[in-house]
Image (tube, rainbow, N blue to C red):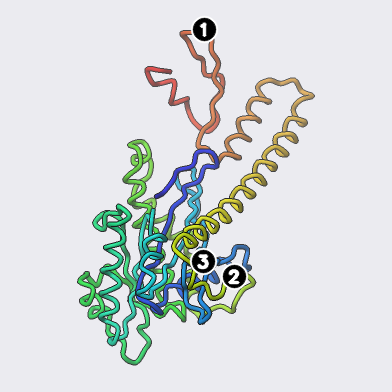
Amino acid sequence: MAQWSQADRTLYAKLVYYGPAVGGKTTNLKILHRLTDPEGATRLLSVNTADDRTLFFDLLPFELGTILGHRVALKLYTVPGQVRYEATRRTVLAGADAVVFVADSSRSRARDNRTSLESLKRNMQANRLDPARVPVVFQFNKQDVPEAAPPQEVASWLGVEPSRGFPAVAVEGRGVVETFIAACQAMLQRLVALADAPTRRALRPEELAQQIERVFAPYRARAGGAPPEPSPGEPAVVPQAAQLLEQSLETSVRLGEDLVAERERARRLEREADALRRLGEALREVEASFDRRRIVETALDLAGSILGAAAVSLVSAASPERTLLERCWGGRGEPLLATPAG
């Protein structure tokens, strides 16, 4: 489940792509990877079979800007669609904050779609994920194939309203970003609703929607054309692993998540090193003046910009019973001093 990390000011969340085999789940992640990271700064980690079909999972780390002073770091997964990998799907689905169900619009696969959706509900319940509460967004993929059913018909196979899904041709990038935006918005709205009361009051739903639109505005234009050429960050493939047991799967998932965590830790250390450099330079500039007010203002300004805080205060204890506000940067006053404890 989602974690609000105060240490590195990051919200970690998990989005899982589910659906029948060869329905386009991995294609969605590949297109998102190419559109949002054309330079290949991150890698799409895949564990595949020899015939290049997902056996265990795909994992794509993705950043979604800043909300309430926290960076939003998503982990995007797909699950194998083949029926024999039920245990794998259940393991990868654990802790999901939202799900994208990628349906194959081919009329010959109506039954496969229904079976996969039943599997999703069953595995959500096995992981104590309430299907009525965890957002599930539908994508009606492969609208370009000769036997494709219209979105309304695909929705009827699944027993859902057509408005809950997005028509798509994932191999061309059509509908991929739109589906992802809807899933992110539904997921973040739910996470904010589950947060404490101050957090819920601090962010209105319309502001959340506007922020997501701003983040994805550059990618919508890219998605309108032909699929981008493969980037240096194409999947790292581990061949023929069908004989591995569920324990090996769990280890692989943990290793994938550890890899993402290590990258995040390295980036955080880089930011901290830069913050120390900036602080040192600022202190050298003001130390000769012996101007206490200027030194305090410089320190608070740096702290606010480095932490991304709305306000930073310096308080002192005038006595055991009395606390004084010496300086507040970015705000009119220190809100904690207005409380009974303050």
Report the residue at 40% width, 56% height from top: 210
The one nearer the camera, 295 or 103, is 103
Q: Secondary structure at mark 2?
A: loop
Label 2 close to label 1 by CB (< 8 Å):
no
Q: Sort mark 3 into few (<14), some (14-19) or many (20+) by Cα contacts within 10 Å.
A: few
Sequence order check: which comes first, mark 2 or mark 3?
Answer: 3
Q: Nearer the viewer, mark 2 or mark 1?
A: 2
Sequence order check: which comes first, mark 2 or mark 1?
Answer: 2
Q: Is residue 166 above or below residue 217?
A: below
Label 3 close to label 1 by CB (< 8 Å):
no
- Residue marked by disc 3: 218
State the separation of the CA atoms marked 2 and 1.
61 Å
Residue 301's spot in the image, x, y percent?
A: 61, 34
Q: Secondary structure at mark 1?
A: strand
Residue 87's spot in the image, x, y percent?
A: 37, 64
Residue 104's spot in the image, x, y percent?
A: 34, 79
Q: Is residue 176 above or below residue 303?
A: below
Q: Nearer the viewer, mark 2 or mark 3?
A: 2
- Residue 148, labelled with which disc? none
Report the residue at 51% width, 76% height from top: 49
The one nearer the camera, 266 or 55, is 55
Sequence order check: which comes first, mark 3 or mark 1?
Answer: 3
Q: Secondary structure at mark 3?
A: helix
- Residue marked by disc 2: 236
In the image, what residue type sits under mark 2? Ala
Q: Nearer the viewer, mark 3 or mark 1?
A: 1
Residue 24's spot in the image, x, y percent?
A: 42, 77
State the separation of the CA atoms marked 3 and 1.
54 Å
Q: Sort mark 1 into few (<14), some (14-19) or many (20+) by Cα contacts within 10 Å.
A: few
The one nearer the camera, 95 or 307, is 95
Q: Quadrant of residue 239?
A: bottom right
- Residue marked by disc 1: 319
